[in-house]
Image: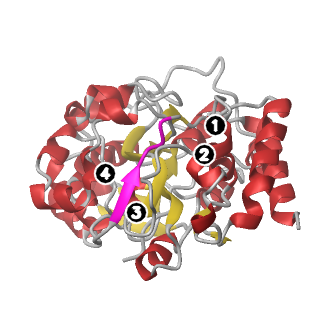
Amino acid sequence: MTRHVPVVLASAGLAFALAACGGASSTGEAAPATLDAKADLSKQSLTISIWDGYSPKDLPQTVKAKLGFNTTVAIHDTNETVMAKLTAGGDSGIDVAFVSGQYAQALNAQGLLEPIHADLVPNLTNLYPEAAQLPYDKGNTFSVPYTWGTTGLCYRSDLVKTPPTSWNDLLSPPAELKKKITMMTTERWLALPALKMLGASVNTTDQATLDKAKAMLLKVKPDLLAYDDTTFGDRLKSGEAAMVEAWDGWCPTDQENIKFVVPKEGSDLWVDTMVILKSSKNKEAAHAFVNHVLDPSVHGWVPPNILYKVPNKTAMESVDPALLKDHPELAQTPADLLKGEGLIDLGEASVAYTRLATEVAAAQ
């Protein structure tokens, strides 16, 4: 199955695209319009934009059967792709978009999002209390979390002499692991291991700290097998790689001898969210859709199918214990996840991360 790569970097282009889109600032906006809880949803329709394979294929059919309106699914491959549509100016034609947390934050800062009308989303009560403590949107005022997770080390216990416990095990690998390790190239994740080793924030914009991180990344580059954001699990399975930087849901821990660990220095907390566009003419249907997704029978599709945790307490309590045994990273508690540092939008300051990634990639 194709799984979504949780792209939570804040690219330099994002800041400039938002600045150019002409969206109004959220500061000083008029209060949101009151929505009609008794609206005839059959007279509305939705277009949602989501990553391929990130929801049940029959979702439009179940929405039609339960809520009475038609849903069209548009596919985007990355946050950047959908952001280009949402920030181009005018009506994008999209009612509900699935974007990562800091992208929702950036959209809201430009006044492009409808506030979440909690009275129209009663299933918000299914969420863990911790799901309202996310740094990009505390209180879920303009977004509703769909999936969440973290980043760590995924490794072959039969090929690694000493189980890794630190990002330093990746950045300064022992001789037997040289050319047997991979790291990610996505800007914020490329920097993450080094920033955590430095005791710095994953959201830092301090250039001196980023320069130190770049030096650490350049030092380990000759020891890497590859930079790999997509096939590191396959490399582990084949034995080509022994240890990789990985998102929790992409570490194939159902395979014998493959383990996942969050290094002692800590890691990130990434979140993918649902947002409703202010330009939508179908806001009541949009809220009904979000509420439908939060039904445990719908939201509970995610863990067994894409191996990501959902912030839905009721849905997670129904996960098959056998799945948790095969994929122990799914058993991470919300408290464990909140130990990770939430990624936030950095605006124009994100150009420093783009520069770092470009310079590391170009180095010989």
Question: In the image, what residue type sits under mark 3?
Answer: Cys
Kindly identify which residue carries mark 1: 197
Q: CA distance from mark 4 to mark 2?
A: 21 Å
Precedes in sequence: disc 1 or disc 3: 1
Residue appearing at x 58%, y 66% in the figure:
177
Kindly identify which residue carries mark 3: 251
Q: Secondary structure at mark 4?
A: helix
Badge nearest the viewer, 2 or 1: 2
Expressed as whole percent of the image width and height from the top left, the position of residue 315 reads 17, 47
Expressed as whole percent of the image width and height from the top left, the position of residue 61 reads 23, 69
Question: In the image, what residue type sits under mark 1?
Answer: Met
Residue appearing at x 11%, y 50% in the figure:
318
Kindly identify which residue carries mark 4: 329
Precedes in sequence: disc 4 or disc 1: 1
Closest to the observer: 23 or 347? 347
Magenta region: which residues?
A: 258-264
Q: Is residue 191 magenta?
A: no
The reply to whether the C-beta atoms of the residues labelled 2 and 1 are less than 8 Å apart is yes
Kindly identify which residue carries mark 2: 168
Mark 2, other Cα within 10 Å: few <14 / some 14–19 / many ≥20: some
Closest to the observer: 297 or 200? 200
Mark 1, other Cα within 10 Å: few <14 / some 14–19 / many ≥20: some
Precedes in sequence: disc 2 or disc 1: 2
The reply to whether the C-beta atoms of the residues labelled 4 and 1 are less than 8 Å apart is no
The reply to whether the C-beta atoms of the residues labelled 4 and 3 are less than 8 Å apart is yes
Residue appearing at x 69%, y 46% in the figure:
191
Closest to the observer: 81 or 35? 81
Precedes in sequence: disc 4 or disc 2: 2
Q: CA distance from mark 4 to mark 1?
A: 22 Å
Mark 4, other Cα within 10 Å: few <14 / some 14–19 / many ≥20: many
Question: In the image, what residue type sits under mark 2?
Answer: Asn
